[in-house]
Each structure stands twice: as C-alpha cells, then as structure tokens.
Image (tube, rainbow, N blue to C red):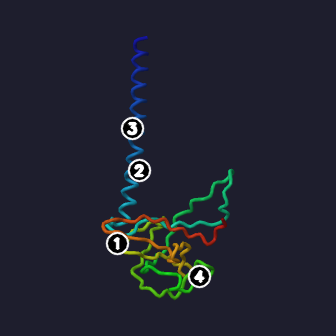
Amino acid sequence: MAKFLLLALLLSQCNGANQHHQNTQEPMENQEQAKDAQGQQAPIQQGISGQVLWVSGNQMPSPDAPPSKGRGVQRTLYIYELTNASQANTTEGVFHTNIQTNLVTQVVTDANGNFAVSLKPGRYSLFSKEEKGLFASIYDGEMNINPVEVQQGQVTQVEFLINYQASY
C-alpha cells in the first residue's frame, strides 16, 4: 500500500511539473513570436507605425455575424505632404491621381500589413497603391485626404483600412 501511495504521489508530481512546464512554454513562444515580429520592422523613434487591413464584403452589423476587422495585406504606402481634396483628381470618391503635393516617402508593408516609417514632425496624407490609383477614403473637416500628424519624439499609430470592396 505504501508503494502505491508513493507511486501515486510521484505521478501527481510529474503531472504537475509537466503542466507547469507547458504553461511557461506558451508565453516563451509568444515572446519569441513578438521578437520575430519586431525584428521584421526596424524600431523608430518618431514617425508613423501601424497596419494596413483589407476589408471586403458585407460589413453590416448583425447579431449573427459581427463585422470583420479585416486581414493584413502587403501594400505600398505613399506618404505625401498634407494633401487637400482640391490638390488631387479623385474618382469614385476614394481613388486619387495627379496629386499636387510632394511625395515624402513610400514604404512597403510586410505580408501582414505591418509598417513603420520615420518622419519629421508635420502633417501628412497616406495613400495605398491600388489598380485604380492611390487609395484613401478618409477626409477631415477641411477636406484633407487621410491626414496623419507626427509630433516631435512620438510614433503615431495608424490602422489603414482598404475598404473599397466593402458594403456598410
């Protein structure tokens, strides 16, 4: 009987240690994944960082199916000096050509849509390269196209939705 109790005690200790090991291993994997993701994007001290998401299909709210957040996609983002709607030709309300402000830089996102770009403090307009032109669907109250502000020593977080094939 004593041997049986000893065996049961040893087995319970082994099982508990195994469970503890599994619990500590999962955060390690998540930490490694986070490090890998950070390694793909060079850290920046000032500028814009975020993700480009593709959204399509029916996005109407429903108790049976919440709207999709979208999926990260690889795109080239064009960053212009702040651009007003009067400084570009616009078709379908969201595709822009003949932009009359200066192109500051461009950045290619990773496969998941993540990007980071260093910029001087200022106001910028973000566009994504699409077949029909440069896409941006957000305007501020002064009709500036997809405005983003970078402040001294800060990184502005952006979620850029490409949603011209979505219905709301």
Asked if the residue under mark 1 is in contact with the one under mark 2, i.e. CB atoms within 8 Å, the reply is no
Q: Nearer the viewer, mark 2 or mark 3?
A: 2
Residue at which label 4 appears? 132
Q: CA distance from mark 2 to mark 1?
A: 27 Å
* Residue pictured at 61% horizontal, 78% vertical: 93
Q: How many marks?
A: 4
The answer to whether the residue labelled 1 contacts the one labelled 3, judged by CB atoms less than 8 Å apart, is no
Q: Nearer the viewer, mark 3 or mark 4?
A: 4
N-terminal of the pair, mark 3 or mark 4, is 3
Residue that badge 2 annotates: 30
The tag on residue 21 is: 3
Q: Is 7 displayed left or right of 90 in the figure?
A: left
Query: Which part of the image, by quadrant, shows the C terminus?
Result: bottom right
Name the amino acid type tagged 4.
Answer: Lys
| Circle on res. 118 | 1
Q: Secondary structure at mark 4?
A: loop
Q: Count residues near mark 3 (Cα–Cα under 10 Å), then give few for <14, some for 14-19, many for 20+.
A: few
Residue 150, relative to residue 81: is it above or below? above
- Name the one closer to the observer, 138 or 159: 138
Residue 74 at x, y = what percent? 49, 70
Secondary-structure class at tag 3: helix
Contact, mark 3 vs mark 4 (Cβ under 8 Å): no
Residue 64 location (% of width, % of height): 69, 51
